[in-house]
Structure formats: C-alpha cells, structure tokens
Amino acid sequence: MSRTYRDEAVVLRTHDLGEADRILTLLTREHGQVRAVAKGVRRTQSRFGARLEPFGVIDVQIHPGRSLDIVTQVDTLAPHGRELMADYSLFTTATAIVETAARLTEEEREASPQQYLLLTGALAALARRRHAATLVLDSYILRALAVAGWAPSFAECAQCGSDGQLRAFSAPMGGAVCGDCRPPGSAAPAPETFELLGALLSGDWDVADASHERSRRESSGLVAVFLQWHLERQLRSLRHVDRGHVA
C-alpha cells in the first residue's frame, strides 16, 4: 500500500512514543488491524490528541509508512471514551472488549467488517448503558468468537447434535453436551444458564435482561473458559472486570 487511505476505526490501545508522539493500535472497518503513529498528539496544542483516546470511534486518514503508518487527519464519530473511562465498571468491561477484539484480529491488514461492527455496537451499548455491562461483554465475546469461526452450541449437544437434555458444558467439545457425551470433569450449568448463554449469542436481550445474577455469574465463567480455550491464552483484562455491577 503506497497511497494515503481513509477509514473508520476504533482505538484499541495507545502507547507513548518519545516526548510527544503516540502509537495507536486501531481496528478499522476495511483495513483490519492497523498500527500507526500520531505525531505530536501529546503536546497541549495538538489539533487532534483528544480524539485519539481508547474506545473512541473515529474517521481517520492514514499515510503508509515504512514500519508504522502515520495518522494525518482525525474526526470523531463517537467519543465513547469519555463515558467509559468515567466509570470503573464500564472501563474494565470496555478494556476486556477491546482486548478481545485485538486478539481476534491480530493479523494486520486482514479486513473483518463484521468484527468491526460487533465491536462498535458493543462499545455503544456499553457507553449508553443499554444493558448490564457484563451481559454486553459476554454477548460480544460469544458473537465475536462465532464470527471468527468458533460458534458455541447451546441449543443442542455440540458432540452428537442431540436436542435432548443438556447436562454439561465443554469448551474443547464446542459448548453444551448431553449426558452421554459429557466428558469427565466438565461443568454442569443450570438450565437457566444455558438459556442465558443462548440469548447472549443470538442477541435476545429480553431474555438476557430478565436473567438472574446467579445465571449471569455462571455464564460469565463459562464464556471466559470458552474464550481462553480458543485463544490458547488468558485475557489479562478479564480478571479486572468489575462484576459487582449487574444492572
């Protein structure tokens, strides 16, 4: 790529560079994950430093560079960072969401408009407090994994396809399993938890919003296990998520 390009993007994370510059990791709509430097943005007179905060949705113009691209122009589309960084529960949840996005789109320049739209939708729902923060997080993780090709099964046995009584959950097998397929040591969630997990995956917010705290906590644990299995590593930010805020 040799010519300047423009795209929508979410700021996933930032790192200071030198005395005045900042390196940005962006998830763009059409160009996948991009690393770029914003020169001079840490100076008080910077024209667009405040527009490049984490969680923000921006319209950005970028010039390709040798090792890092260069941000040349930025317009704010949705300043979610202001709202999300003002509340600890929202901040920790948003951090886990963007880390998940970063892990699932690690291949630079590989476009994934679906992943981008899922991310912007989750951040908007979180910033506008449409649902409990942990429900937004778990729904995002399940749907993002599905887009990546790892859709879990909650309505039928992930091993044999039976739609009978589901008695256990196994990340290696792909989700819910029946009594005949249940591997030793697997978790045995309540039926209400499977119902909630299915609602979070499908986006049935009437069911999700009506769920009880016990089901939410159990489902969050299973979502974390499922994510870790497919990423083959722990998500560092998940351990800091404030799960005491359920509504």
Image (tube, grey):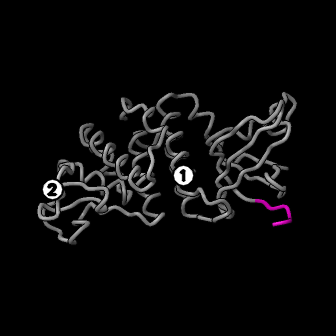
Which residue sits at x=81%, y=49%? 71
Q: Which residue is drawn at the image coordinates 44% and 39% (left, top)? A: 238
Quarter holding residue 146: bottom left
Q: Nearer the viewer, residue 106 or 145?
A: 106
- Compared with 78, 166 (above or below) is below
Q: Residue furthest bottom?
A: 161
Residue highlighted by disc 2? 167
In the shown orientation, is residue 176 left or right of residue 106? left
Q: Main secondary structure of the magenta part?
A: loop
Disc sitting over residue 103 in the figure:
1
Q: Earlier in the sequence, mark 1 or mark 2?
A: 1
Left or right position of 200 against 91: left
The vertical placement of 128 against 199, above or below, is above
Q: Which residues are magenta?
A: 1-6
Q: Secondary structure at mark 2?
A: strand
Is-magenta flag for residue 3? yes
Element on which disc 1 rests? helix
Residue 237 placement (x, y as % from top left): 49, 37
| Residue 195 or residue 247, whichever sits in front | 195
